[in-house]
Image (cartoon, helix red, strand yellow):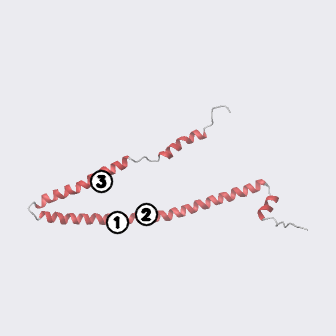
Amino acid sequence: MSSQYTPPPTEAERRAETESLGTLMSKVTTDLSTLIRQEIALAKAELTISAKKAGKGAGMFGGAGVAGHFVLLFLSIALWAALGGTAIGYAWAGVILAILWAIPAVILAVVGKKNIDEIEGAPQTAETLKQVPEAVTPSKEPR
């Protein structure tokens, strides 16, 4: 004689037997809505932390840039004084330093302009947004 063991129904199975489909769908919708809200809250919290760290890092880079500027300024003054003490004089030493600094300035400006000119914005997003009105406009073709 063989008897088969049947486990007792789970909570979900009991609810499926006793509650209407509308009630179950309502609970699923509520649970899904809660899950989405929680995921959005988590994403906001993570992005806030990341933005604070990025801001702090950007501030550090800014400070390093200011300090680097002063290093170059004082090295330039020292070079100007060293060249000025020679036969060329201080005026010509200043012109020579100005020309030396003009070279990287022009190179950086040209490369920077090239990079700016290559910016495309968000071409994929723009294309997708153009398609949105077509997607929500009813078709004029008969079905």
Rendered residue at 76%/56% (across/down): 23
Rendered residue at 30%/49% (across/down): 110
- Give the foreground label among 3 and 2: 3
Residue 104, image x, y percentages: 26, 55
Q: Earlier in the sequence, mark 3 or mark 2?
A: 2
Q: Looking at this rendering, what residue extends furthest in the right direction?
A: 1
Q: Looking at this rendering, what residue extends furthest in the front direction?
A: 1
Q: Is residue 16 above or below residue 124?
A: below
Structural distance between the alpha carbons of marks 3 and 2? 25 Å
Q: Tag on residue 63?
A: 1
Q: Is residue 21 above or below residue 81?
A: above
Q: Where is the N terminus found, in terms of image quarters?
A: bottom right
Mark 1 Cα-neighbour bin, 10 Å: few <14, some 14–19, many ≥20: few
- Residue type at numbered disc 1: Gly
Q: Residue tagged by mark 2? A: 55
Secondary structure category for the residue under label 1: helix
Question: Which residue occupies the foreground of this view, 11 or 7?
Answer: 7
Direction from residue 141 to residue 58 in the image, left or right: left
Rendered residue at 67%/31% (across/down): 142
- Residue type at numbered disc 3: Leu
Mark 1 and mark 3 in contact? Answer it, CB < 8 Å.
no
Residue 56, image x, y percentages: 42, 66
Q: Residue tagged by mark 3? A: 108
- Residue type at numbered disc 2: Gly
Mark 3 and mark 2 in contact? Answer it, CB < 8 Å.
no
Q: Is residue 120 above or below residue 85?
A: above
Q: Quadrant of residue 88?
A: bottom left
Structural distance between the alpha carbons of marks 1 and 3? 21 Å
- Give the foreground label among 1 and 3: 3
Q: Is residue 17 above or below residue 132?
A: below
Secondary structure category for the residue under label 3: helix
